[in-house]
Image (cartoon, grey):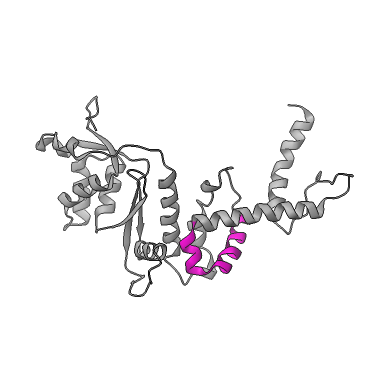
Amino acid sequence: MPRNEAHALGEQPAFSAALLDPDLPPPDGVIGPHGKAATKRFAVYRNNVTVSLINALADIFPVVAKLVGQDFFRDMARYFITRHPPRSALLFEYGHEFPEFLKDFEPVAKLPYLPDVARLERAWLDAFHAADAEPLMPETLGAMPQERLGDLVFTPHPGARIVQSDFAAVSIFSASREDRPLKGIQPLAAEDGLITRPFDTVQVRQLPAGAASFFEALTNGHTLGAAAALTLDSHPGFDLPSAISALLEAGIFTACHLENASSELPE
């Protein structure tokens, strides 16, 4: 590698750090057209980058911004940016660490549901940008001998996500996005959310008790029979037939095959 090229690569971390931290001076080598220090020029560039990242976070987490207030959110986002710089040039991929950041951010400790609301928002965007895929059709299961259903293994849809919460994150998320009042929501009531995009529209729905565990077991490669047994062990009242109908309706999976079989069933 040429010496000047290696030198430039060595300066990149310093440049990135200075770009996101207003307390740091401009990095060495940043000069104006006449060889003078470009402090003001760099400050303008740094501000533009920071504002772009703040705006990206506000677009990704609009419910969180609404719950804490726009001014507070922008200050919080600025603080987050200095500690979690982007790793991709695609702004919609930014902010995966934001829900975890909220868990340890003391100023929002009185809103314990906020990290899970953020997880739902991040999952919504990931589902929106996921690859297109046709959902599994009911006819596929209908063509199977009933005695073999327990041996089925499912292929998850690229847009399917599950968020389990100890709080009413799904209700808060849905009410806020639909501009409905939060009055009447019990924030400490545990809720699990399913995010899917079987076709063009992202859907978020609250799952009944046990369904999240059941769907996650299937997503992790368990057979239908094994996933049902695991779920019924922890949730004795789990409604298995309704859950199977729900997985088909929601488009959580794209295909299924018999365990140890060499070919998939038709979709």
Q: Main secondary structure of the magenta part?
A: helix
Give the number of marks: 0
| 47 relative position to 231: left or right | right
Residue 175 point in image, percent of width and height: 37, 66
Residue 49 point in image, percent of width and height: 66, 52
Residue 141 point in image, percent of width and height: 17, 37
Q: Is residue 81 magenta?
A: yes
Residue placed furthest toward the top = 262
Q: Nearer the viewer, residue 146 or 183?
A: 183
Residue 115 point in image, percent of width and height: 45, 61
At 53% from the left and 65% from the top, the residue drawn is 105
The quadrant in which residue 222 appears is top left
Where's the C terminus, which quadrant? top left
| 56 relative position to 218: left or right | right
Q: Nearer the viewer, residue 96 or 202?
A: 202
| 257 relative position to 117: left or right | left
Residue placed furthest toward the bottom = 183
The magenta segment is 61-82
Vertical side of 80 occupied by 254: above or below: above
Vertical side of 120 occupied by 152: above or below: above
At 59% from the left and 42% from the top, the residue drawn is 89
At 59% from the left and 52% from the top, the residue drawn is 84
Q: Is residue 249 magenta?
A: no
At 89% from the left and 44% from the top, the residue drawn is 34
Where's the N terminus, which quadrant? top right
